Image (cartoon, helix red, strand yellow):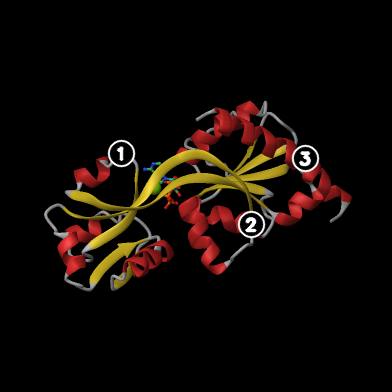
Amino acid sequence: MSPASLDKPLTLALSKGRIFEETMPLLAAAGISVTENPETSRKLILRTSSAGLQLIIVRASDVPTYVQYGAADFGIAGADVLYEHAAAHPGALYQPIDLNIARCRLCVAVRTGFDYEAAVRQGSRLRVATKYVRAAREHFARKGVYVDLIKLYGSMELAPLVGLADAIVDLVSTGGTLKANNLMEVEEITAISSRLIVNKASLKMRGSGLQPLIDAFARASAGGT
Ligand code: ATP
Ligand code: MG
């Protein structure tokens, strides 16, 4: 790496929405503020109050990819996204801290009135729609339930309502979206929160810049919950 690239600001990859919003207090704890708002700005590269740090705004599920290939030095992504990413790229990312932000749970939900327990007891083959195919496959394998998994990229709640699937595996926080769509949670698979992920080469080459930020995030997330 040339000296010039070592002078570049560190790049933190974030998705907009809840992860961006919940990361702002962690940056503030490190003395850094961000004036541009990704919800209103069309910019995908945002400066911060520190010349040494810039943000890039990418899809939640793309954050691990940017960090793995070093296009971002570090990033913040949900355990859900990291688990699916690790299926194809095990061990590719250093994951020093659970930031305890964007907390929710991964669960199985069905249409209100669908007798999930009976279907499982009877050994029925279930059609399950999800974005989280690895987590879903492993969950049903542990239970010994045969499933046909249908990969979706969003709006999972719709699938049981229109007969695409018997069940979905999706993230839930309040349960309001499930309820609004006549669905009910029948099983929790795991609790989810977001983690800091770091490019392994960046940590070696740019550790003096990265480590103080990692430490500040660790302190802020441990103290903030
Ligand atoms: P995209 O919009 O790009 O398809 P996404 O819907 O996963 O991605 P977000 O809704 O911003 O993007 O979710 C980002 C992360 O926040 C998820 O990966 C998950 O870890 C967490 N998350 C998702 N839904 C909730 C929720 N209802 N409450 C709290 N955290 C959530
Ligand atoms: Mg979402």
State yes or no: Cβ of the residue under disc 1 lies below 8 Å from any atom of ligand 1: yes
How crowded pointer 3 is (Cα within 10 Å; few <14, some 14-19, many 20+) is rated as some
Residue occupied by mark 2: 93
Quick check: 119 left or right of 74? left
Callout 1 touching callout 3 (CB < 8 Å)? no
Report the residue at 32% width, 70% height from top: 149
What amino acid is labelled 3 in the image?
Gly
Residue 141 in sight from this viewpoint? yes
Residue occupied by mark 1: 174
How crowded pointer 2 is (Cα within 10 Å; few <14, some 14-19, many 20+) is rated as many
Q: CA distance from mark 2 to mark 3?
A: 18 Å
Which of the two labelled residues, at mark 2 and mark 3, occupies the earlier sequence position?
2
Residue occupied by mark 3: 209
What amino acid is labelled 2 in the image?
Leu
Q: Residue 210's image quarter?
A: top right
Residue 225's x, y, as percent?
A: 50, 30
What amino acid is labelled 1 in the image?
Thr
Q: Nearer the viewer, residue 85 or 108?
A: 108
Quick check: 15 left or right of 145? right
Which of the two labelled residues, at mark 2 and mark 1, occupies the earlier sequence position?
2
SS under mark 1: loop
Residue 123's x, y, as percent?
A: 20, 73
